[in-house]
Structure formats: C-alpha cells, structure tokens
Image: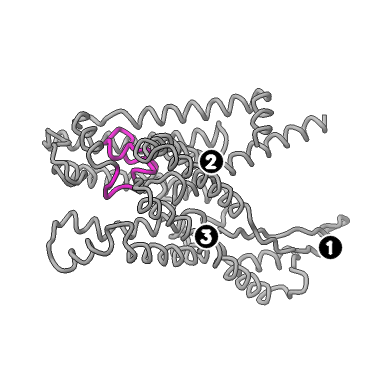
C-alpha cells in the first residue's frame, strides 16, 4: 500500500489529484471549527469540557468530527447527505419510478443524485432547526451544563443560524463531489474519513492522560489487532464461479469466458450500525425533549440510555443483525442477478439457469450474511466494552462505526490508487 502511494506521488496527474484531495480535506476541517454566528464559543467550550463527550448526539458528532457540539458552520456534517442517500436507495425498491431511473443507467443515476441533493437540503433545514431548538435551552444539548449556548434567541438570529448551517451542508456536499470528480476516491466517504480520523489523536491522548502509559499501550496493541481483523473480514468474500457459453453474433464468436460473482462477508458495510444507533437514540431523544417523568420515560432512562447496560447492548446487537439482513436483502437481488446471467448466456456450473440459480444465490447470501452480521455486532460493541473497562468516551477510537469507516475508506482509496496506476502502466506498455 505504501509503495502504491509512493508511485502515485511520482506520477504528475495522480500527485495533483492527491494534493487536491488533501487540500479539500483541510478546508473541510477548517469549516468545522468556525462557530456559527450567534453561538457563544466560550460557553460551548466550557460545556464540552464539563460533559467530556457524554451526550445524546454522539453518533452525529462523530460523523461531523466534533463540529456538531461546537455548533460550527459545518455542524451538521455529512449526515444529511448520508440520510438522503439511504432514503433514496430504499425508495428505489418501493417506488417504481425510482427503480426505472436506476435501470436507465447514467442518465437515471444523475436524476437520482439530483433528488438526493434536494432531499439533503430539506433534511439540512430540518436538522439545523431541531439542533438550534435544543441548543437554545440551557442544559438540553449538554447535560449538567446550564450556560447559555445561544445568548440571543430572537427569530432573526435563529433564522440566520439555520441558513448558515444549511448552507454549510450544501458546501460539504459540493466539496465531496469535487473530490469525486477531481480527486481520489469517493468524496463523501473521504469527508467522513476526515471527520472521524480528526478525533483519533484526542481520544488516544485522553486515555493516556486518564489511565497512564500501561493502559495506553494496551489499548494501542488491542487497536492493531482490531484493525487487522477488520481488514481481513472486509476483504473476505465468497466467489461464485460463472461460466458464459459461446455464441455466434454475425461472424464473430462471443462468450466462452469464466468469471465470478464476489459476495462479501460484510455485504452491508457500516449502514446497519448507523441504523441501529439512530434507532436507539430516538427513545432517549423523546425523553429529553418532553422532559417527562412518566413510567415509560423512567423505563427508557433506566434500560436504554446507559450504553454499558445489558439491555442496551442486547438491543443494539439484535438491531444490527436485523438491519444487516434487511439492507442486504434490498441491495442484492438474486432474481435480478439470475435473470441478467440468463440473458447473457451465463450460468453457475452445476446449477440450472433461471429459478434454480436465484435460489442458489439466495441460499449462499443468507449463509454468508450470518457471520457478517455477527461481526458487525461484535465490532460495534467494542467501544461500549471499552467504556466500561477503561472509562473511555463512547467514541472510543478502535471500534464501532469509527474503525469500520476508517478501514473501509482507507482500503477503497488504496485500491483506487492502485487501479489508476495499473491503467497508466497499461497505457505506457501499449505506446
């Protein structure tokens, strides 16, 4: 991997792409520390020091690189775009019009992307309004901290803050598309990687300050093992062989090749962890917004607020398994794959084309999703276990959503750099 980066820097056009990507990443981090007009930066810093990262919005704060709790210009981070992308992807299964656009190829994908942008702006306005509504009341955004975060709560000031935060979301979306077009890798994934990686040094140093060098070195050793295990599982896949029969078109002979269908062990990626975390935040959010003392609120506070409680961990684990199967079922359609194979003369050796192929693919997918779901569940529980053992924050660096995204994006970016290097090597050979 290091050799690939070294060769990339020796190639002028790839070097320009990498430097452009690094420049956009630096600009993104700069916007994450600029406070929104109307926010008391001094009070925000005081409250953050008091609560030490223990709050209701830890997941969204993780994706924004700490910008959310600072109420910066980029406070909403990339979450509105992620949510919009997931919603549009789910709607392609429900709405026939969206499914038709998906099958149209590049033109249909462009329209779906445009719908995602519009939905991102709408969600940005909604989330910015909700965040400011929570932050304007002292003690809501930061528990046990009653300092005024927004001293001037007039409607003019609130409108300005909503506009600035929504505009920040639009700028983040634009920066991500710039990286995709002119840089290296998927722009949105790179920005998520930047947000999460920005918090790693602080998290590690806080463990060293609180627990000393022995615990710090132990955590680093555990982190290396976890990263190696995640890399192994993320690259693991079941390759189903596919044979294409020879066919004559005019005077040309086509087909007769062998290939395979790669089915990853972790076919769903990090999406089930995001879904499960978001769903578990909803009851806690309702209790905080309503400030209810009823029996249902007491039950939620007792069993589903503390991350180290057995009921919370069990619910989190089961939700991840459920959403893994759910997401895989809507993103990989065995009937569609079998139909495309039959259309182009492909078949799995020993399996008849058509319905038997679809049933075979569904059987393989259900079996390989089981270890993938268990893997996601165990990795997601690592920061909760670390919270109990070491007193770390819930954004423990080596585990959960953070490590899955960082490793996944890192592997994908390295593969893209290697593929572009191979393309240039082939071009030089042909010349």
Give the Cα distance between marks 3 and 1.
41 Å
Q: Is residue 380 above or below residue 48?
A: below
Which portion, as a residue range, is magenta?
53-78
Q: Assess disc 1: are there few (<14), some (14-19) or many (≥20) residues with their C-alpha within 10 Å of its C-alpha.
A: few
C-alpha gap between disc 3 and disc 2: 25 Å
Percent x, y of residue 151: 12, 33
56 in the magenta segment? yes
From the image, tell me which residue sits under label 2: 186
Are the two marked residues, 3 and 1, in contact with CB atoms closer than 8 angstroms? no
* Drawn side of residue 27 relative to residue 33, left or right: right
- Quarter of the picture containing the C terminus is top right
The percent coordinates of residue 252 (x first, y second) are 86, 55
Q: Which residue is tagged 3?
A: 375
- Looking at the rendered image, the quarter that the N terminus falls into is top right
x, y percent for residue 103: 56, 57
User: What numbered label is drawn on residue 246?
Assistant: 1
């Amino acid at each position: 991997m290091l050799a690939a980066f070294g060769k990339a820097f020796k190639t002028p056009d790839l070097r320009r792409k990498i430097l452009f990507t690094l420049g956009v990443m630096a600009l993104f981090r700069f916007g994450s520390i600029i406070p929104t007009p109307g926010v008391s930066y001094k009070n925000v810093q005081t409250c953050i020091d008091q609560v030490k990262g223990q709050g209701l919005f830890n997941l969204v704060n993780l994706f924004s690189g700490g910008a959310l709790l600072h109420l910066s210009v980029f406070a909403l981070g990339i979450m509105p775009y992620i949510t919009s992308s997931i919603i549009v992807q789910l709607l392609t299964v429900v709405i026939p019009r969206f499914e038709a656009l998906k099958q149209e190829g590049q033109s249909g994908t462009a329209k779906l992307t445009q719908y995602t942008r519009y939905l991102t702006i709408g969600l940005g306005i909604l989330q910015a309004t909700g965040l400011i509504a929570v932050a304007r009341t002292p003690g809501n955004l930061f528990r046990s901290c009653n300092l005024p975060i927004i001293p001037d709560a007039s409607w003019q000031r609130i409108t300005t803050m909503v506009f600035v935060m929504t505009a920040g979301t639009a700028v983040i979306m634009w920066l991500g598309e710039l990286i995709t077009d002119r840089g290296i890798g998927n722009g949105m994934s790179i920005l998520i990687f930047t947000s999460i990686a920005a918090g790693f040094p602080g998290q590690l140093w806080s463990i060293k300050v609180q627990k000393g060098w022995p615990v710090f070195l132990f955590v680093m050793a555990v982190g290396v093992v976890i990263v190696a295990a995640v890399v192994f599982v993320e690259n693991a896949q079941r390759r189903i062989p596919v044979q294409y029969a020879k066919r004559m078109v005019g005077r040309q002979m086509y087909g007769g090749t062998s290939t395979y269908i790669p089915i990853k062990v972790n076919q769903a990626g990090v999406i089930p962890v995001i879904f499960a975390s978001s769903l578990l935040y909803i009851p806690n959010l309702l209790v905080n917004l309503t400030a209810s003392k009823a029996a249902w609120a007491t039950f939620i506070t007792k069993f589903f607020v503390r991350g180290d409680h057995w009921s919370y961990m069990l619910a989190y684990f089961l939700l991840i398994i459920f959403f893994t199967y759910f997401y895989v079922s809507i993103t990989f359609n065995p009937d569609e794959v079998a139909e495309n194979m039959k259309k182009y003369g492909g078949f799995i050796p020993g399996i008849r084309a058509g319905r038997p192929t679809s049933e075979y693919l569904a059987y393989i997918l259900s079996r390989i999703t089981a270890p993938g779901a268990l893997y996601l569940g165990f990795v997601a529980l690592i920061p909760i276990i670390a919270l109990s053992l070491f007193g770390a924050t819930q954004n423990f660096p080596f585990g959960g959503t953070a490590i899955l995204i960082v490793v996944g994006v890192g592997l994908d970016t390295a593969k893209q750099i290697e593929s572009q290097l191979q393309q240039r090597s082939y071009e030089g050979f042909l010349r």
